[in-house]
Amino acid sequence: MLKNRLIIVTGGAKGLGAEIAENIYNHGAKVIIADKDTENGKQTAKRLDSDFFYVDLEDPSSIEELINSVSKKYNGRLDGLVNNGAIATGIGGISFEDIDLDTWDKVMRVNIRGTWLMTRAAAPLLRQSDSGRIVNISSDTAIWGAPKLLSYVATKGAIISMTRSLARELGQDGIGITAVAPGILTTESTEYVPAERHNLYSENRAIKGPQEASEVTSTISFLLSKGALTLTGQLLTVNNGFVFS
């Protein structure tokens, strides 16, 4: 499905990002792991016979350096981008009245601006592909309105709106862009989430129980394929039926 396609996964060092990278690798793609977490990023890249590049999504120059390095190594080639990198840990459980300005601004810079800057930087390379694809990772928290997580929820809602607007601009160049909104997954990156939130999902999904990352990654791999263009601009709520969109 993805044989010989070159795809960047931001936030690919561990958690859902690493699971995404592994799934698209198993479908035949060449994966580029892009992350601030150098140690885990290099380990994941080695396991998947892939490349690791450092990127700080809060730093525009770091994003440009990443894309320039990829372009140089692969002769201007790029077929796909997964905008998965985001701040999620350490910002929940706080009332909207108690969020400090520095935290709010940092989450906005990484989750929203970082996604925009990655897309902007990668677009010239994706235009040269015969089937450029972008998948933005949103969250179903933006659909059902998870409380005490406002900065994160706001950014994930913005990702959905950005995807729709970008679909109309990028579609002129044959580039497809979609958004995926998972629920809470069973990964190392969600161990910090309180048990009651995990239980809320497990008990109220149409398909009861926890959701593994592998139940999301296959959808993402399809959306990166040549056959997914007709879905451009769409939001896929891949959460085993906790909420519907």
Image: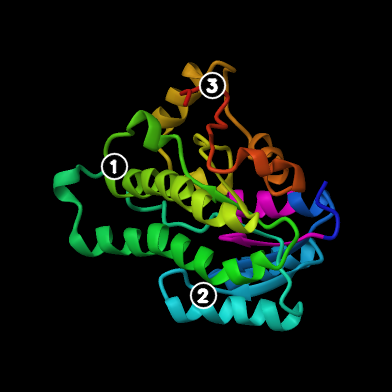
Numbered label attached to residue 63: 2
Label 3 neighbour load within 10 Å: few <14, some 14-19, many 20+: some
What is the quadrant of residue 66 in the picture? bottom right
Q: Residue at x 40, y 36 (%)?
A: 141
Residue linked to disc 3: 241
Upstream in the sequence, badge 3 or badge 1? Answer: 1
Q: Residue furthest front?
A: 172
Label 2 neighbour load within 10 Å: few <14, some 14-19, many 20+: many
Residue linked to disc 1: 93
**Marks 2 and 1, how far apart at CA:** 30 Å
Q: Residue at x 55, y 15 (%)?
A: 206
**Magenta-drawn segment:** 5-23
For badge 3, the amino acid type reads Gly
Upstream in the sequence, badge 2 or badge 1? Answer: 2
Q: Is residue 82 visible?
A: no
Q: Residue at x 65, y 81 (%)?
A: 69
Upstream in the sequence, badge 3 or badge 2? Answer: 2
